[in-house]
Amino acid sequence: MSETARNRLMLVIAIIMAAIYLFPLYWMYITALKSGSEMFATPPSFWPASPQWSTYTYVWESRNMGLYLWNSLVIAIGAVVIITVLGVGCAYVLARYRNIWVDIGLFLILMLQVLPASLMITPIFVGFSQIGMLNYPRLAVIIAIAAKSMPFFVVLVRATFMAVPMELEEAALVDGNSRVGAFFNIVLPLARNGILVSAILIFMQAFGEFVYSKSMIQAAELQPASVGLNSFMGPNTNEWNNIMAYATMYVTPILAIFVLLQRRIVSGLTSGALK
Amino acid sequence: MRRILSSVRDGRGFDIVLVAFPLGFLFLMAGLPLIYNVVMSFQEVDMFSLGTFSRPWVGFKNYVDLFAQPETLPILYNTAIFVVGSIAGQFLIGFGLALFFWVNFPGASWLRGLFLVSWVMPGLVVGAIWNWILSGDFGVLNFILKDSGIISGNIFWRSDPHYSLYAVIIANIWLGTSFNMILLSVGLSGIPGDLYEAAELDGATAWQRFWTITLPMMRSTIGAIIALGLIFTLQQFDLFAAITSGGPNNSSNVTQYWAWDLSFRQYDFAKGATISVIMIVFVMFASVVYVRSTRHEVRG
C-alpha cells in the first residue's frame, strides 16, 4: 500500500471515530430542530423532517435567555479579570526563580487546584453569609471562582514564562530598564499569547460554572445560564427539543471560540498540565 | 520609605509584591475556608447558628453520626465504583485513540484537537445532552442498542437503581476521554523514535514493542494521568445534578454530591462539612501522587 493510500485510509477511519465521538453534540443540534411529535418518534429520525427554527426564538423569549447569558458573561469576565491581574505576576515569579520557596509555593498551589468545588462550597457559603457577602451574590460567585481557578491559570502561565529566555530580561536591565520596566516592556509582550490562551480556558470554565452559582445566587434575575438550564430540566420534563435549543444557544459561542483557536488552546493546555 | 519604594520598582520587592497579593488572596479564599471546614465538622451547625461563630462544640459526634447513617456505606461504595469505572473507561479509550492518532497522517493533529470539545463544554450541558440520550422510552442509545441486538428491552438508565450510577459513568467517560487522550498523546510523542527502529532491527513484533518500549517509557505520564483522573472524577458534580440528582433512592449518589445535598437541600451544614473534610483528605492524597509523578518536570 502506498503512502498516500495509507494516509487516506487513516484519515477516513479518524473521521469516522470523531463522528462517533461527537455524536452527542450532533444529537443536541438535531433534537433542537425537531417538532414535538418527531422528537418522540420510534425509530428516531436522524435528520429533521421539517426543521423548526422557531423553537430558538420561542426558547430565547420564554426562558429569558438574554438575561441568563448576560449573567454568565458578567461572572466569567469578572473571574477572568481577577485571575489575570493577580495570577500573571505570581506565575512570573514562580517561573523566574528556582529555590525551595518556589517549590513550596508551587506545591501549595497545586494542592489548592485539586479541591472539589462541591466540597468547598459549604465553608465558603457559611463564611460568606457571615460577612454579608451573599448580599452581592454575583460578586461572591466571581471571587469563589477566582480562588478556585487561579491555581490552574498560574500553572499554565508559568509554563509560558519558562519559555521566555531570561537573557532578554537581563539585557533590558543592563540597558537601564528598571525591573518594572523590563517586566512590562519585554517579558509580558513575549508571554502575551500564552496568557491569552490561558485566560480563554479560564473564561470557558467560568462561563459554564454551576456549583457556586447554584448555591449562592437565589434571585432568578442574577443567575447564570447553567443554573437556568438546571431549573429548565425538571425531573419529568418532556420538552427536550426546547432544552436542546437552550443548550445549543448556550454552548455554540464556546464551541466557536474553541474551534477557531483550537491549535493554540490544545498546545497551551498540554504545555502546562504535564510540565 | 524611599528604599522600600525603589525596591518595589527595581529589586526584590517587585517579586514580593507580585507574589504576595495572589497568595494572600488564595489564603483568604481557599485556605481559610479549608480550615473553617474542619472547624465546622466539629460543631453543631443549623439554620439558627449559621450567622454566629460561637456554636456548640460536639467533638467527633458528626463523624460518629455520619457513619451510623445507613446510606453512608453505599454512597462510599458508589463513589468507589464511579471513580474506578470512570478512570478505567477514560484511560483505556483515551489510550486507544492516542495510539491511533500517533500514526502521523495529514489532519491528525487537527482532528485530535477536535475531540476536546467534550471537555470545554459546560458540565451542565453535557449532562443535559446525555440525560436525553439515555432517556428510557425515547432515548437514542436504547434505540441503537436494541437495533444492533445487544439488548431486547429498553433500559431505564436514569430511573432504574441498577443502572443510574452507570448512566453518570457513561457521561463522565465521554466527558473526560478526550483530555486523557490529549495528555497521553503528549507523552507518546516524547518517546524517542530510534528506540523503535532498534527494536525493529532486532525483530521485535509490534506487540512486543508496545509492552517493552511504549508502556515503560510512558510510566510517569500514566501515573500523572491516573492521578489527574482521580482528581477530576472526584470534582465531578454537574453531571449528577443534570442526570440523576443522586437518585433514585441514593443509588447514584456519590460523596461529592451528597455533601452538597446535605448542606444545601437538608441544611445540615455540619454533616456537609464532615463529608467534605473526609473527601478533601482523599483528594489531597491523590494530588501528592500527581505532584510526585510530575516533579522532575515541575522543576523544569
Image (cartoon, rainbow, N blue to C red):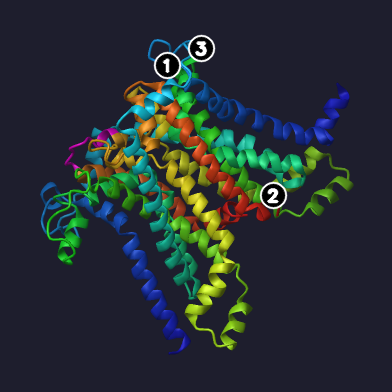
Q: Earlier in the sequence, mark 1 or mark 3?
A: 1
Give the answer, above or below, for where A257 lies relative to A68.
below
Q: Chain of mark 1?
A: B
Residue A229 in which image quadrant? top left
Q: Which residue is mark 1?
A: B45
Q: In screen coordinates, is A246 left or right of A174?
A: left
Residue B276 in which image quadrant? top left
Name the main secondary structure of what is drawn in magenta.
loop
> Which residue is at the front of the view, B274 or A88?
B274
Q: In screen coordinates, is A83 left or right of A14?
A: right
Q: Is A232 contained in the magenta span?
A: yes
Residue that appears at 15% across and 62% down: B146
Residue type at the position of mark 2: Phe
Give the answer, above or below, for where B159 lies relative to A79.
below
- Over which residues does the magenta segment extend? A231-239
Res. A265 in view: no
Give the answer, above or below, for where A213 lies relative to A260.
above
Q: Which residue is mark 3?
A: B53
